[in-house]
Structures are given as C-alpha cells and as structure tokens.
Amino acid sequence: MKLSLTILTILFTFLVVGQEGRLKYANELLENKSYFYAAQAYEDVLERGIDSMSIASNIALAYDKTGDFMNALNWYEYIYTQGKCTDYQILRYVLLEKRAKNYTKAYETLTTYLSTKEPTEYELNLALNFGNFEKLAVADENFKVEKENINTHQSEIGISYKDSSTVIFSRNQRSRLMENQIHSWTGSYFYHLYKADVTESGKLNNVTPIKSNRKSKFHDGTGVYSPQYDVYFLTRNNAEQLKRRNRKDEDNSQIKLEIYTAKVENNALKNIRNLNRINSRKYSTCHPTLDTINNRLIFSSNQPGGYGGMDLYYVQLNKRGNIVGDPINFGPEINTQEDEVFPHFNSVERTLFFSTEGHYGLGGLDIFAAKLDTNFQTLKLRNLGAPVNSNQDDFSYVDNAFSQHGYFSSNRDGDDDIYSFTKLKEIFHTPLLNGKVYDGFTENTVSNAMVYLFNDKGVVIDSTYSSLTGSYNFKVEQNETYLIRTQKEGMKTDEELLLTDDSEYYTVNLHLNTTPNYLFAGRVIDQETEVDVPNVRIVLMDSTGNIKNYTYDSINGHFIIDNIRYQYGDDVDFTFVVSAPGYYTRYIPFKETLGDRQHLFLDNEYDVVLIKNENYEITDLFNLMPIYFNFDKHNIRPDAAEELDKIVVILNQHPDITLYLQAHTDTRGADYYNMWLSRKRAENSKKYLVAKGINPERLKIEFYGERKLYIPYKQIRDAKGIVEKERLHQLNRRVEFVISLQ
C-alpha cells in the first residue's frame, strides 16, 4: 500500500511539473507574439486539466490576435460571465459580438458596462452610433461588387495600381525558394508580391510573381506605386533586426514592419531603400499611400504618441521623394484606440479611405471614407456600408484615377480575397445651393446684392453678387449647417438658415426691404402696488432659444427698445425674459406678423406686471441670468459669453462671493449621457470664468442632467409645433448661477 501511494505521488508530481513547464512555454510564446503557436500550447495545457480561468485572458488574446474571432469571442464571453473582464476585454467582447451579428447582445453589454463608469469619447461614440448598423447593412446603390477570379485558397490583399493596365498585390503563397515560412503570429505563410493585368472591363488575370531579394521568411506586402518618383513604396520586415534579437534595450519579440522604396523592373524588386526617417526597430510603420498633388506620404504606424493601436500619419516628401519633416497624426476624427490601417488617398477628390474597427460599423474592419480639406483636416467621415463592408474584415480599398473602378479585400467568405467594384454614384456628393434675391415689397428681383455663405462657426466661406436676374449659387457639403445672408445699401439685411442632408439641390430665396422703425415700449409695474419696478432687465430669446444680442436695463421700470430691426411682413417669434431683483422672472412670448403698426407691446398692453418673490435670495440681488446651450453641445455660445462677462465683473467687485454653477440638459438622450453633457457644460462655464482671471476655488460646479427641468416634460410634449417644442427644450439646456457668501 505504501508503495502504491509513493508511485501515485511521483506520477502526480511529474504531471504537475510537466503541466507547469508547458504553461510556461505557452506564456513565453504569447510574450514573443507567437500567437498562433501560443493558442495551440494553451489548448494543450487545457487538455491536461489546468483551471480554465487561469489561462482565459491569455488564450482569448492569442485567438484574437490570430484572427480566430469565434474562439476569441467564446473565451471573452467566458471571462465576462465570470465577472473578470478588464475594460479592454469588455470592448473586444462587444466588437466581436458585432462581428458575429449579435448586435442586440453587444449593445446591451456595452450600455451595462458604460452605466458603471464615465465613458470615454471613444466609448460614447461607439454607444451613440450603435444603431447605424441597420442602415449600413442595406446594400448601397453607390457600388456594384464582384469577386475576382484570381483568388486562391490563400490570402490576397493590398492591391495597388502600377498603371491603368497593371496592378500589384500581395499573396501569402508558399515559395519553393524559402524554408520555414510559417508566420508565428498568424500561422500563415508570409506575404510576397505579385503582378496582374487589368482587362478593359476591370477584371484581373495573368498573375505573375515579383521576385524579391529575400531568401528567408519575411513579408513583402502592401504598397503603392508612384509614377512621379518611378518607385514602389512597399511594406516589409526588417531583416537586420534578426541580428539584434538579443538586444535588451529593444522589443524584438516581433520583427517590425517598415516602409521601403524599390524599382520594379522585369518582374523584380531592385534598388531597395529603407525610409529610415519614419521607420524604427521599436514600432511598425506600414501600408503606404500617396497624396500625389501635395507630395505627401500617408501610412499606418503604432509609434508612441498616438491614440492607441495603429494610427494614420502623413509626412511631406520633396521633389526627389525624400522625407521632409516629422510625421503628423491625422487626429481623433480619424484615429481611435483601435487599429486604423490600409489607407488609400484619392488626391483629386481629397478623400482618404482606410479600415478600422474603431468607428461605428458592421463588425470587424470596415472601410471608411474621410473627406479632407486642403490642410488635411477631416470635413466628414462615412462608413461605405454594404456591399463593400460586411460583418467580417474589409480593407485595402483602392480606386483608379477616375475613381469609378477599384478593388478591396475581404475575408467575408473565409480567406482574404480580392473584390472589384464599380462606383455608380459619388461617395460625397457636392450639392448645389441656388436662389434669388427679391425686393420684399415689390417681389421684383434685386441685382448686384452681396450674398454671403457662412459655415456653422460663423465664418464666411464664399460670397458672390446676385446676377441681373437676382440669381446666385454656391457649392455646399452634405449634412452641414449654413447661414446665407444678403445685403445691399439702403435695404434691410436678410438671412436664412440651411441644414443640408443627402439631397443634391437646395433653393433659398432671400428678400431685401427698406428698414421700418419698429419699437417696443412700456413699463414694468408691481402687481400689488402698481408702482414702477426698479432695476429691470429685459432679454430677448429667439424661437430656438438663442439669446439675441440685445439686453435692455431700466432703472425706473420704463423702457423703449428701438434697436431691433425687422422688416415689413416678418413673422416674429421670440420670448421676452423680464426680471428684477425680488420678483419672479417672466417669460413673455411674442409672436406676430409685422405690419403697419410700428409701436409694439410686450404683453399686448403698455404695462408689464411682475409678482413679488417672497423667497427672495441674495442671488436675485445680482439678477444673474442663466446661460443657454445648443442641442447636444457644451461649447460657450456668444450670447452666453456676454452673460459670463457680466458675472466676471460682479465677482471682481465682490471678492467674498462663491459662485455655484448648476448645469442641466433637456430630456433627449440617455440619462448617463445627459449627466456627462451637463458636467461638460458646467466645466466649460467654469473654464471660461477662470480664463478671465477668476480664482477657481470660488467656483463650484453641480450637474444634474435632465433631473431638474425648468420646463416639465409634459408641457413640452403637449406643446404645438416643432418650433415651440424646441423653444421649451432650450429653456432646459442651461447653466444657472447661485451666489453664496460663505
């Protein structure tokens, strides 16, 4: 019996030691980024009876990195059900559920997670755009997509035009000249370059390998050909790094990707040159494309200082193709904490195409188009949707010089394959705005009137004179906000707001009139005593809730407001906000079509009655008005800045005052989002005051989201018309100020 126990003990010890050694080996593979072999090693350890939770995070990462997303999803789900997920793992779990088309489950997981923390900008955008997958999944009429016949059971990616009849692409097909070709990260063969002919119909045939100077296992991959420099910019591994793998001051667990240039002559790469200015042994630089008009090289890199993962950068090239200056990050409008890869730039249309899982999409890598201005700032971003995108990886988009035909890669059918497309419509339409300028009294057209086009920041972006027939036109962008204003000497200026959508044509007619002398007059009296109320302030709020740029202060309660200019026939719709220390503030709506009567009254009669506030506080003494915000915004508007400037004067005159800034939202949006939005409004208001020299210790912020509405939801719901509802919503989007002498 003792002998049997001894034998069992020895066997158990041997198994434990063997299991521990195998686990150590699997961990070393993972640390060296040999994810394919690490996943196999962890499965082996699992079969030997190790606790699943002890390896769950590592095996999930290994499967995720190799692209075995279903196994990765299963492991992330297991970790999630055990309540052990890190923030990174939860987001990967959500993204992989999207890839598996489990959209409802992914959204529920994400919102549950966000309810426990203050969301980052990335997490917030992911949640707000989650519902877009239904629209994206509907096949877009912009594209016709076909699978190419040159595809094999291997991976075909990274296509680029050498000229109108030839393309270069990458395939991970095994070569007889190379040994030990398995890439330990993915378990696949290494990529090599191939050439194919383009038929008149855009189909690919006659595939020919491009010879490399490589005799060992390395990638030659995604690139772009430059007719200007007559070189091919390509992605490849740095062979010299193998000699430095024992250097302890460098991360050589993975041979980094770098960008090279080479001549392509007689189906071979020649004169290969390393672009050392942007490459490094400490990070990867890959997937080059070119801005052929401005001589800029665009690429993907995980160099330090980015937004996470692989980011897109650009750098200037001189006339000889040499790099000038340092790379510039495209910024958060493009880059996210996920990978942004495989860029392609259409220089004529100033459109950057790239793939990422970081913006809203159908799952996996989706192809996006970003419209850029001349300074490479992002004007708008669009997911190309189906049929270009799927719930799997879609990437390596490229179009020809005329942007009507091109190719991309996708693993929607298993392996990475090349698909061709024909673009039937423009991705970003250039809508046309036209209209006429009329005389408001005679309805005759007005020639030679100046017409301005403003963007949503109030900046003039174009201008013109009306023609002999009164006509004008501008090119505008989709899904933008514009203000069109016309003026002519001796006539009343007119302006109209334009919110563009996906339409191609817009018409905005403008009317100029001579300026009538409309004015508001009256006095403010106490309801009980009927005597004049002193220190009255009258503020005008338009129908959208914006504070107009006129404020009238009356010492004795009498007022004449004659600096408000409207024209005959105007439909006036705004609210007078009448306040005085010790009285309840009144909001008096004024809605009227202006006609012959030029002397107007606030409350349909000369006297405006205020009711005394018995609960009068010290805050009322200073007559502080709330400031208001646009829908879903937290920036300080010009009218809010005027009120804040008045508060600065009060705080400077009374150094013993502490000011509480209480921020609110309207009822639209999720509760956690409105709490975040009201906090941002309070913080930005405080920042404004601090910038004006106010000690931040005197400013206390409070934020309530939609929990303390000035206008109850029922009143807004029962209001008639969209304009009236929006006016009431505006009164809730505010920051109020409370003074304390403590």
Image (spheres, rainbow, N blue to C red):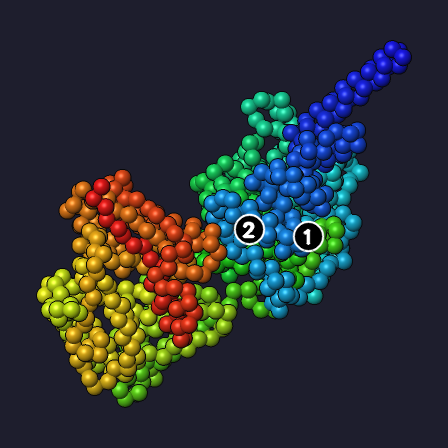
Seen at 51% across and 61% down, the residue is 349
Tell whether 676 sits left or right of 129: left
Residue 715 appears in the figure? yes
State the SS at label 2: helix
**Where 419 sits versus 312, above or below?**
below
Residue at left 21%, top 60%? 613
Graded by Cα atoms within 10 Å as few (under 14), some (14 to 19) or many (20 or more), the crowding at tag 1 reads: some
| Residue 50 place in picture, x, y as percent | 75, 29
Residue holding disc 1: 100
Residue placed furthest toward the top: 2
Tell me where residue 539 appears, x and y as whole percent.
23, 65
Mark in the foreground, 2 or 1: 2
Mark carried by residue 111: 2
Residue 725 lies in quadrant: bottom left
Of the 4 image quadrants, the one containing the N terminus is top right
Which mark, by number, is residue 549? none
Rendering coords of residue 516 (x, y %): 19, 80
Kind of element beneath mark 1: loop
Closer-to-camera residue (303/576):
576
Q: At which x and y percent is residue 327? A: 47, 42
Q: Amino acid at mark 2?
A: Thr
Please give the name of the residue rendered at 64% of the width and 42% of the height, measured from the top-left corner. 80
Nearest to the observer: residue 566 or residue 432: 566
Q: Gap between marks 2 and 1, in whole Å?
A: 18 Å
Query: Which residue is found at the position 64% from the left and 58% from the top?
Result: 389
Marks 2/1 in contact by CB < 8 Å: the verdict is no
**Which badge, 2 or 1, is on the more N-terminal residue?**
1
